[in-house]
Amino acid sequence: MPTPLLLILCTAPDRETALKLSRSLLEQRLAACVNLSPPVTSVYHWQGRLEESEEILLLIKTTKQQYNNVEATLRAQHPYELPEIIAVPVEQGLDDYIDWVERCTKE
């Protein structure tokens, strides 16, 4: 049975930006937890060119109910013209963890 949780993927240009975005989401109780990856290499098309850059991947744990608020916060604070914001539904998970995420993201 699907859960009310989402895993949102978002990349940032550097660790400082990733931490700033993460703290903002947590301070507003829009996420229960944000994991920051080591630098990843992203290869992508942008404005007619093939680009390659080093980025930090944010793994944002939140609820479907908070998605619009998370997106609005990321769009407002992100330095990219077009930030990656992809939400993946969480189909299953440890019940206690799911409950914890829900408690942490209540307004």
Image (tube, rainbow, N blue to C red):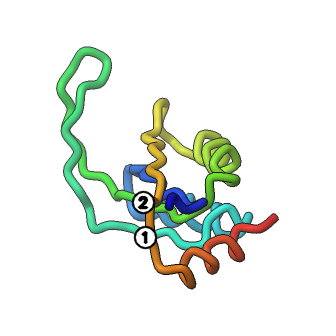
Q: Quadrant of residue 3?
A: bottom right
Q: Position of residue 77 (x, y in %)?
A: 61, 46
Q: CA distance from mark 2 to mark 1?
A: 6 Å
**Residue 70 horizontal side relative to residue 11, left or right:** right
- Observer-nearest of 16 and 71: 71
Which residue, as the protein is rendered here, is positioned at the far bottom? 96
Q: Quadrant of residue 101?
A: bottom right
Rendered residue at 23%/45% (across/down): 42
Rendered residue at 54%/72% (across/down): 33
Q: Which residue is mark 1?
A: 35
Which residue, as the protein is rendered here, is positioned at the far front? 1
- Observer-nearest of 37 and 91: 91
First reached walking from the N terminus: tag 2 or tag 1: 1
Q: Secondary structure at mark 2?
A: strand
**Residue 65 horizontal side relative to residue 6, left or right:** right
Q: Position of residue 38 (x, y in %)?
A: 28, 68
Q: How many marks?
A: 2
| Residue 58, disc | 2
Q: Are marks 2 and 1 in contact (CB under 8 Å)?
A: yes
Image vertical order of residue 104 relative to residue 90, above or below: below
Image vertical order of residue 73 relative to residue 26, above or below: above
Task: Name the amino acid type tagged 1.
Answer: Asn
Disc 1: CA contacts within 10 A as few (<14), some (14-19) or many (>=20): some
The quarter of the rendered structure image containing the C terminus is bottom right
